[in-house]
Amino acid sequence: MMSMKKARQALLGRSMKPVRIACINYAEPTISGRKMSTLTAALQKCYDKHFLPVWGYPVDLYVTQKPKPTDWQLVYFDDASHKNMLGRHELTHRRQPISKIFVKALGEEPISVAASHELFEMVLDPMANLWADKNRNTQYAYEVCDAVEEDSFPVNGLPMSNFVYPAWFEPFQHPRGTKFDHMGSLKAPFSMTEGGYVIKKVNGRRVIKAFGSPEKRRKFAKEDRRGHRSEFRDPRGEHHPGRRASKRRG
């Protein structure tokens, strides 16, 4: 597990130059070419205006079917059994970070919310292996959207995922008026909204999920979680990156 100090040093090293992120559409005709262009432009505007000033680490999103070897990827699939679902969960076959959106599994959730959620979390923790210490026995996964994942705000007429601020990961008292998330829904570190959830590691081994409400727990249990970051954070799960991935799972 990478320490937070080393993680911040690594992120700082790449923050001086935008990371190129190839946006690839395998979900046609559900996402048309025009819709893909509109979505990508809105994501870039949202990132530059709202996320970048808080977290840093500039990115350059562009639509393509032929990503360069050094590109990171934001890929849209029909579902988790799509024929192009190849490689390990968190890396492309060229060993670069990748995030995946499974369109048919979203239900009523807007694609833009899911895409911004995955984009923000990939940038902050590309390998999904960072944890923040709350105390000696409990760590919280470095996921910036899960705790507020059902909250959204508009950009170019499209809803985008709320996200937490750095103070959310800091286990000490903060001055009055400190923001813990972009929309101002949270009032303390490691808290969550009724529509959110968090992933915790207890005593360095046991990984558990806590939910903001019973309704959120029920909704979560019904979801198809294949290929999701929450599954391979748990070393007991079948989708852990240490296990060999099949072509059915990304």
Image (cartoon, rainbow, N blue to C red):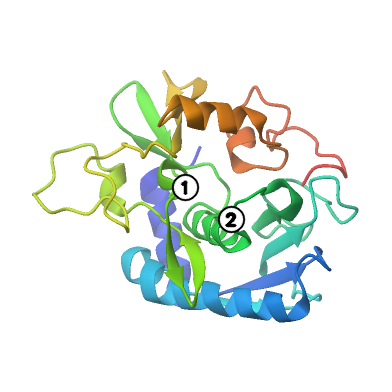
Residue at the (86%, 51%) spot, across then down: 82
Circle 2 Cα neighbour tier, 10 Å, few/some/many (<14 / 14–19 / ≥20): many
Circle 1 Cα neighbour tier, 10 Å, few/some/many (<14 / 14–19 / ≥20): some
Residue at the (30%, 23%) spot, across then down: 136
Q: Where residue 175 sits: x, y (%)?
A: 9, 49
Residue at the (69%, 71%) spot, across then down: 23
Give the secondary structure at mark 1: loop
Q: Is residue 148 above or below residue 157?
A: above
Q: Where residue 127 sits: x, y (%)?
A: 58, 48
| Pointer 2 or 1: first along the chain | 2
Left/right placement of residue 169 relative to residue 12 reads left
Query: Which image quarter: residue 234?
Result: top right
- Label 1 belongs to which residue? 150
Q: Which dot marks residue 114?
A: 2
Q: Which dot marks residue 79?
A: none
Left/right placement of residue 6 relative to residue 108 reads left
Q: Where residue 212 sits: x, y (%)?
A: 40, 32
Q: Where residue 80 sits: x, y (%)?
A: 79, 45
| Residue 240 visible in the picture | yes
- The span from disc 2 to disc 1 (Cα, nearest Å) is 10 Å
Please name whichever residue, 93 or 225, is drawn nearer the observer in this view of the structure. 225
**Quick one: which residue is furthest to the left in this view?**
176
The amino acid type found where label 1 is placed reads Glu
Q: Is residue 174 above or below residue 98?
A: above
| Residue 70 visible in the picture | no
Please name whichever residue, 66 or 51, is drawn nearer the observer in this view of the structure. 51
